[in-house]
Amino acid sequence: MNVIKCVVKNPDTGKRVSRPNPKDQWQTKEVPHLRIIDEEVWQKAQALKVARVNACSHFKRRPAHLLSGLLRCGICGAGMSVHDRDKTGKTRIRCSAVRESGSCSNRRIIYLPEIEKAVLDGMRQQLKAPDLIEAYIRKYNQERRELAAQANSLRTALEGKRDRVEGERQRTIDLVIRSVIAEEDAKQRIAELKAQLSLIEAQLCSLDEPFSHRA
């Protein structure tokens, strides 16, 4: 693609500044001989990229803090939010209702590391109880089974779709071989089917990744 640029001068510095012209003035031309990779590899890479984006629910950005979104004000029930950081860099929090509307009487500012330590210490003590350990293991195994069932169900659906798309691709190729349709007419459809197959294969490859990371 050839993007024509216009050159102007910065009125303050007098230096030349290059700026791309509007898109409607761009000149484009296909140059397949300059490709670094072939079309099939490119389509597979794009399909894998889409599949990873679609799987993002398993890789959500981690909270900024251990207890982000979990702390509530004991007076009004509103969430606790970051107030500031002291000179040593420690985070302090307060009731968000105070900051946003002043409707809460709880003006106390608390150090977040102290709250996190208190919560973790409490969890350590509670998790020493055998019945709580048993409940944790039971819940963990249940979630593992549910994730496995969801993955198997999705895999079955994707494999069925892959077989249907591959079947259509083979039928289209057979029609070209038998001269029922012209190769030129079928080229675009075959390319679309190959792209669909690449996307499905990428989705199948990504199915086990989130589950394996939890093992």
Image: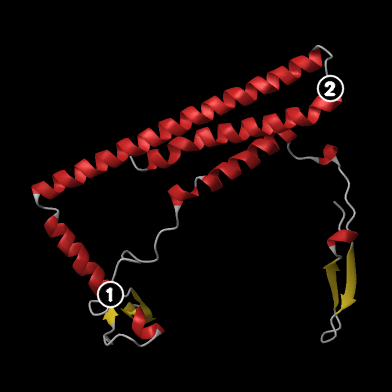
Task: Tell me which corner region of the image, top left, top right, bottom left or bottom right, holds residue 194.
Answer: top right
Amino acid type at circle 1 is Gly
Where is residue 166? Give x, y as percent: 64, 23
Q: Which residue is mark 2?
A: 183
Left or right, residue 149 beside residue 44? left
Give the position of the C terminus as an image quadrant.
top left
Q: Nearer the viewer, mark 2 or mark 1?
A: 1
For image coordinates 84% across by 14% down, the residue present is 179
Within 10 angstroms of label 2, few (less than 14), some, or many (20 or more) residues?
some
Where is residue 152? Give x, y as percent: 41, 30
Q: Quick check: can you spot residue 87?
A: no
For image coordinates 17% across by 64% down, the residue present is 121
For image coordinates 57% across by 28% down, the residue present is 161
Query: Mark number for residue 77?
Result: 1
Name the secondary structure under disc 2: helix
Where is residue 203? Give x, y as percent: 54, 36
Q: Is residue 190 above or below residue 146?
A: above
Q: Is residue 10 above or below residue 178?
A: below
Query: Mark number for residue 152?
Result: none
Q: Which of these two is toward me, 197 or 119? A: 197
